[in-house]
Image: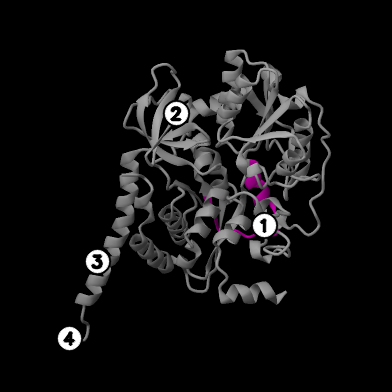
């Protein structure tokens, strides 16, 4: 119930001003977007859905930043490993 | 991007695990509470504890709305459902929760019309289709679901529906965290903040936890990497001597929350003077009720309910589990008398309950068997 599901907005429903057709893993369902009126929802937006309501827009830039941070941690680690491998304190 | 798979990369998780281990001071033990039941679910489902050093333990908090509903409220809902002209609608999670006189499933088997719905809007649809019945929605949840309930009431009011009401059991997260901090049994080093509650309330309401209680909090997403990254951020704060509220889940959680969602909650609901939480007892200003303006949609005013406080079964230790004092497998009836099929306590019912999550996904390592059988 509290587990939110991400879905992508396919179209706004012309006959209901607060509903949008959203695709969740290929399954299409009408979702209430009334709580996101101020942000404005357009087709192509990703939203997080709880109990039939879109609660929040998913920010792709922030998601990328988060992933960059995570892979960056990996880079730093790889660099450290490479540096370790390259270092030889026994050589004169 | 699908915003799911990207945050489940095992390779990145292993790197994070190494970074986490490197941040731990030798000889120091760390205890972080994940407040939200959704996090508990992810932790067990993906076996995240295996990625953490032994010195870092995750303690499960009270953030499972099904788990904190006291037995008396289940009895009240069943009393409403027993009216001949009532259809009680409820999220599936609630159906097995035992009250003093059985669960919704038991009551349904005995003839009450109780139906599972995915959304409160489904309940509204049932009300429209059954004008000769009174349809009651069992409203539960933290701030995550309260706006949906409020929107549904507003829709019912706008449509002039007079056979729809809600039995409001919405609770608020901040008083629960305060109760945890006030509990003398538990020493915590920080909090993994509830991501989805925060989509509504934002990160500001947690600032006092860092400022006054001196505990860092990282608001976290629900994928495995989100949780590991939050643990990393908490450890980094401790190492650097910082104590702040950070937002790991910025892709979904705006710092100021969702003002529209807060507005609709405020329009339809108000704080109760006090509310009983399973395991935590009565907490002041910790739950919501329908306000005077929308009294016509308040099942508590429409129906007379017993309103009797029912003590939890003696064998059940959900209270200790909810406060993070006991691990699920340390409860005396875990996995024996209490299972997801025949739960004694609420923590075994909801998929977000710590006991159910552990029962379904947990693995007994040798150490844990030793720990569990020591008593």
Query: Answer yes or no: do the residues labelled 1 and 2 have beta carbons within 8 Å?
Result: no
* Mark 2 lies on residue: A30
* Mark 3 lies on residue: A79
In this rendering, do the residues under marks 1 and 2 share a single chain?
no
* Mark 1 lies on residue: B321
Label 3 sits on a secondary structure element that is helix
For residue B157, above or below residue B5: above
Crowd around label 4: few <14 · some 14–19 · many ≥20 (10 Å): few
Q: Which mark is residue A91?
A: 4
Image mark 4: chain: A
Task: Please provide the residue range marked out in magenta.
Answer: B175-192
| Coloring basis for residues | one colour
Image mark 3: chain: A
Q: Position of residue B229 (x, y in %)?
A: 42, 55
Q: Quadrant of residue B11?
A: bottom left
Residue at image point 67% right, 62% down:
B326
Q: Which mark is residue A33?
A: none
Image mark 2: chain: A
């Amino acid at each position: 119930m509290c587990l939110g599901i991400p879905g992508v907005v396919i179209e706004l429903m012309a006959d209901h001003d607060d509903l949008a057709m959203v695709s969740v893993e290929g399954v299409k369902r009408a979702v209430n977007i009334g709580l996101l009126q101020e942000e404005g929802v357009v087709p192509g937006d990703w939203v997080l859905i709880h109990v039939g309501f879109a609660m929040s827009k998913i920010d792709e830039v922030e998601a990328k930043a988060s992933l960059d941070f995570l892979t960056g941690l990996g880079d730093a680690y790889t660099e450290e490993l490479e540096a370790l491998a390259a270092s030889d304190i026994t050589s004169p | 991007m699908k915003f799911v798979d990207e945050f489940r990369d095992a390779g990145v998780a292993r790197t994070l695990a190494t970074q986490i281990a490197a941040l731990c001071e030798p000889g120091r033990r760390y205890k972080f509470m994940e407040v939200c039941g959704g996090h508990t679910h992810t932790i067990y489902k993906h076996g995240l504890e295996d990625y953490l050093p032994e010195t870092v333990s995750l303690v499960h908090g009270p953030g499972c709305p099904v788990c904190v509903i006291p037995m008396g409220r289940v009895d009240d809902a069943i009393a409403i459902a027993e009216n001949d002209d009532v259809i009680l609608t409820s999220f599936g999670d609630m159906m097995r929760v035992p009250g003093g006189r059985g669960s919704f499933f038991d009551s349904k088997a005995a003839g009450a019309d109780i139906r599972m719905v995915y959304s409160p809007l489904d309940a509204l649809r049932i009300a429209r289709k059954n004008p000769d019945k009174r349809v009651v929605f069992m409203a539960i949840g933290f701030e995550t679901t309260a706006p949906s309930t409020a929107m549904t009431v507003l829709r019912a009011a706008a449509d002039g529906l007079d056979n729809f009401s809600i039995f409001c059991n919405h609770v608020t997260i901040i008083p629960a965290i305060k109760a945890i901090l006030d509990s003398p049994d538990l020493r915590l080093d920080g909090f993994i903040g509830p991501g989805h509650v925060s989509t509504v309330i934002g990160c500001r309401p947690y600032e006092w936890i860092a400022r006054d209680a001196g505990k860092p909090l990282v608001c976290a997403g629900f994928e495995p990497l989100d949780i590991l990254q939050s643990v990393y951020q908490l450890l980094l704060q401790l190492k650097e001597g910082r104590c702040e509220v950070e937002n790991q889940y910025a892709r979904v959680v705006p710092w100021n929350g969702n003002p529209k969602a807060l507005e609709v909650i405020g329009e339809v609901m108000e704080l109760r003077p006090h509310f009983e939480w399973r395991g935590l007892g009565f907490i002041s200003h910790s739950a919501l009720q329908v306000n005077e303006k929308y009294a016509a949609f308040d099942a508590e005013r429409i129906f007379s309910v017993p309103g009797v406080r029912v003590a939890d079964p003696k064998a059940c230790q959900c209270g200790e589990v909810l406060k993070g004092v006991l691990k699920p497998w340390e409860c005396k009836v875990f996995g024996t008398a209490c299972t997801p099929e025949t739960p004694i306590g609420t923590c075994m019912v909801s998929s977000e309950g710590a006991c159910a999550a552990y029962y379904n996904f947990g693995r007994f390592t040798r150490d844990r068997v030793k720990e569990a059988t020591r008593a």
